[in-house]
Image (cartoon, rainbow, N blue to C red):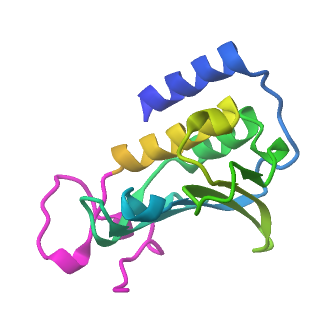
Amino acid sequence: MKPFRIFLAVAVLSELSFSVASAQNSVETIRFNSGSCMGQCATYEVTFYRDGCAVYIGRYNVAMIGRYTAIVDFTTLEEALVALHFFDLQPRYGGDVIGDSKVDIISVEGKTNKTVETRSPDPTDMPKNLLLLERVLQGTIYNARWFNEGIGKQDHGYKKPSEVVPTCVWNAM
């Protein structure tokens, strides 16, 4: 996680002004969806929970198909939302192309506070702070130690997510 904290700090200092929003600490869940891009792109969904549990569901064009769990640093993701002014973004960027990615932020009350969709594979169609946030989320996904109890014995040399956060259990889809 350390490289992402450094990346986030550089992004904030060079591109954006940091401000602590009242939304910080009210975020309960962050959901990131990567769309199908007309069948060519990676299609998966990851939900990050405040307790550190992350649930990945891989669908198409990804190495991990199915449901996986991991433990992540939710605080870093929440800080990225605030530092990159996620709550100030428009709800949609791009044209009428089928969605490429979507970020949902769920509040403590369980209602969607903010959803931002990108509907174009062209990164120039969206603001830099949204691109940076997507990179932070994708980097967290890439660096997580994913575990799938349905695969059988997996000796990764670390604890299962459910041993760290008891509610972070693998459930078959």
Tell me if I can see residue 109 in this picture: yes
Is 116 located above or below residue 154 in the figure?
A: above
Depth check: 96 or 102 in front? 96
Tell me if I can see residue 164 in this picture: no
Depth check: 52 or 107 in front? 107
Report the span colored magenta: 145-173
Image quadrant assignment for residue 158: bottom left
Q: Residue 36's spot in the image, x, y percent?
A: 45, 63
Is 105 located above or below residue 110 in the figure?
A: above
Q: Residue at x 47, y 58 (%)?
A: 37
Q: Quadrant of the C terminus?
A: bottom left
Q: Relative to residue 98, is residue 88 drawn left or right?
A: right
Is 85 located above or below residue 151 in the figure?
A: above
Q: Residue 165's spot in the image, x, y percent?
A: 45, 66
User: What secondary structure prevails in the magenta region?
Assistant: loop
Image quadrant assignment for residue 88: top right
Depth check: 80 or 116 in front? 116
**Residue 33 lies in the magenta stretch:** no
Q: Relative to residue 75, is residue 138 drawn left or right?
A: left
